[in-house]
Image (cartoon, rainbow, N blue to C red):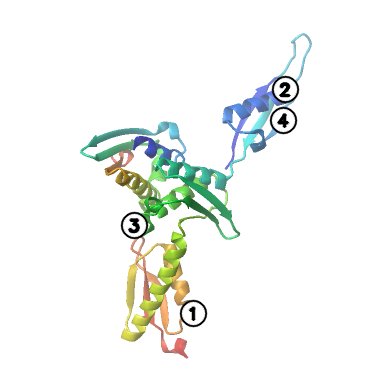
Amino acid sequence: MDQSMKVSGKTVEEALDTAVREWETTIGRIEYHVLEQPRKGFLGIGAKQASIEVFLRIDPVEEAAAYLKDLVQAMNIEAEVEVKISRKHTMMEIKGSSLGLLIGKRGKTLDALQHLTNTAANKYADAKQHIIIDAENYRGKRKESLQRFAERMAGKAIRENGTIKLEPMDAAERKIIHQTLHQHKNVETTSSGKEPRRHVVITPAAKEKQK
Amino acid sequence: MKSFAYIILERIVDYPDDIDMTESEENGRVLLEVRVHPEDAGKVIGRQGKTIQAVRTLLQAKASAEGKNVRLTLLNDQK
């Protein structure tokens, strides 16, 4: 969503200057169209000001990155935010030393930063943004340990020939479990329960799937 | 804590000028009482309370680093 307003001035340029100052932005982020051309008139009689409508282009990713930087800084942590945009999602990596405070227990603080950054980004976005925030490769390491855990639990389900109910996880973590065990011929996975208690259930596969 | 809470909230809401906050502290326990514009209350709470929980998590992370506890109450919740 872009902001817009009407401004006037003696000339179009002057009106644009007013808009730049008003929004504390740069001319590059402003687009406009002329509503009324200025007229000089005769001895001031019949003179008319220029009137334009200006639009402020807001880049949701830029806004979100600035927000994340402010949050990290306010937590007294010296770090940089690196933005990587791929086709699937936008990744923001917090780079610095001793970022444990930003990650928190089981990534709780990192998830909070991610949720707030996405909320701020989507305030301006026409298409919903999905920003992933990582620090010290926490997401990558968590994925690997979830994959190992999934394999272990699949083994247990087969050995005991019974259903295994995992701890509640968020959607991203459940997806990792489902994907890991998707290739597994001997087990099936489903999700059950309501958020935030939704969890993965692993069951030994029905006979057909094993053949 | 108050200024940090303001930094967190101002980009989530549509009416940052209407954020009203009081802070009190007793024995390392910080209490933040926040009121936002009525139209912003839903945004601050978020789906299933996810946004307000995230705000609290960040506040507590910073407070813990300072050896404190923090509680945030959204006054819009209560009539």
Q: Which mark is residue A183?
A: 1
Residue beneath disc 4:
A34
Indicate which label's residue lies in the foreground, 4 or 2: 2
Say which element carries label 2: loop
**Which residue does the image show at 39% across and 54% down from the upper left?**
A103
Q: Is residue B38 above or below residue A41?
A: below
Give the chain of mark 1.
A
Indicate which label's residue lies in the foreground, 2 or 3: 3
Indicate which label's residue lies in the foreground, 2 or 1: 1
Q: Amino acid at mark 4?
A: Val
Give the chain of mark 4.
A
Outermost residue toward the left?
B27
* Pointer 4 and pointer 2 on the same chain: yes
Residue beneath disc 3:
A105
Residue beneath disc 2:
A11
Q: Amino acid at mark 3?
A: Lys
Indicate which label's residue lies in the foreground, 1 or 3: 3
Count all numbered tags in the image, as a single digit.
4
